[in-house]
Image (cartoon, grey):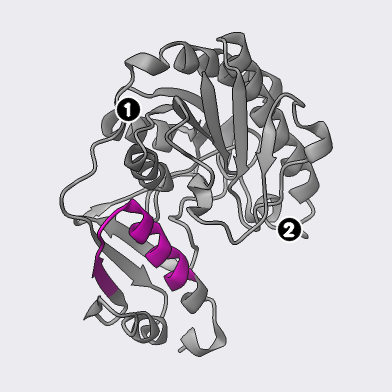
Amino acid sequence: MRVYVSVDMEGVAGVATADQVTRGGHGYPRAQRLMTAEANAAIAGAFDAGAEDVLVNDSHGTMDNLLPDELDQRARLLLGEPKSEDMAAGIAAEHDVALFLGYHAAAGAPGVLAHTYSTDFFGVRLNSRPVSEAELGALQAAAVGVPVGLVTGDNVLCDLVRTRIPRAFTAEVKTAYGYSAADSLSPAQACDRIRSQSAQAVAKATDLPAAEIPGVLDLEIDLHTTNAAALAARIPGTRRVADRTVLRSCADPTELVDFIIVCDQLAGSPSARD
């Protein structure tokens, strides 16, 4: 049994503010420890259920947030950026199940620190429906035949997962009280819940289906300025469909994520400011 784990930070218990998830913020070092503890809980649960190999991908921001010297030594750590497949870097057909930890709701949703890949995007829609990073990751996993077994985060995300990835287990570790406020479980309680749900997901992995990849993958991104949209529209195969919105018909989940990452880089450039 080979297990893949992708770890973000915004959905971790005890995390609710931009200061905590931004390098240099006063709360960031503590958030690193909380993130690492949740990763360790999932790793422990996976091995409880018979895992033989666990690969952990650091998926937040600069992708070097997890504390390697505090991570369960039975797991391998993939860190740093840029990485092919980004938040799903390293996932392969050899994996039996994927676990997504510390994830958050989509851009525009009422979840804690909700966004889709970039705070420079006001909205990201797949086939006209708002899409979260968890859903995009599920499509990337499905492209190599891997099911998503567990998603952890706030109540808004977990409610979404129960609808969009219905066979996946969830571990709800906090309730959103706004964009930067949460009613959170204690870190210890959250880790206990994650370890239990991780073990169940790994134990049931062979019964879980991979996500269905739609035949059409039309991705729309609402950018923060008209200049950013103008720049993104210059990417071959991309159309500008509104003042701040671009549309691209993608061939596969990898192209979806690649396009998002390029638009994020463009949106952050000085020439993208109005």
Q: Residue furthest left?
A: 215
Task: State the residue in front, 241 or 178.
Answer: 241
As drawn, the label of residue 162 is: 1
x, y percent for residue 102: 56, 37
Is there any visible trace of residue 164 in the rendered image?
yes
Q: Residue furthest right?
A: 69
Judge the density around disc 2: few (<14), some (14-19), many (≥20) Cα neighbours within 10 Å.
some
Task: State the residue in front, 190 or 207.
Answer: 207
Q: Could you tell me which residue is drawn at 57 percent across and 32 percent down?
A: 183
Is label 2 in a helix, a strand or a loop? loop
Is there any visible trace of residue 273 in the rendered image?
no
Question: Where is the C terminus found, in terms of image quarters?
Answer: bottom left
**Three-letter amino acid code at disc 2?**
Arg
Instruction: Read off the residue under disc 2.
Output: 23
Q: Which residues are magenta?
A: 246-264
Q: Could you tell me which residue is drawn at 70 percent across and 20 percent down?
A: 188
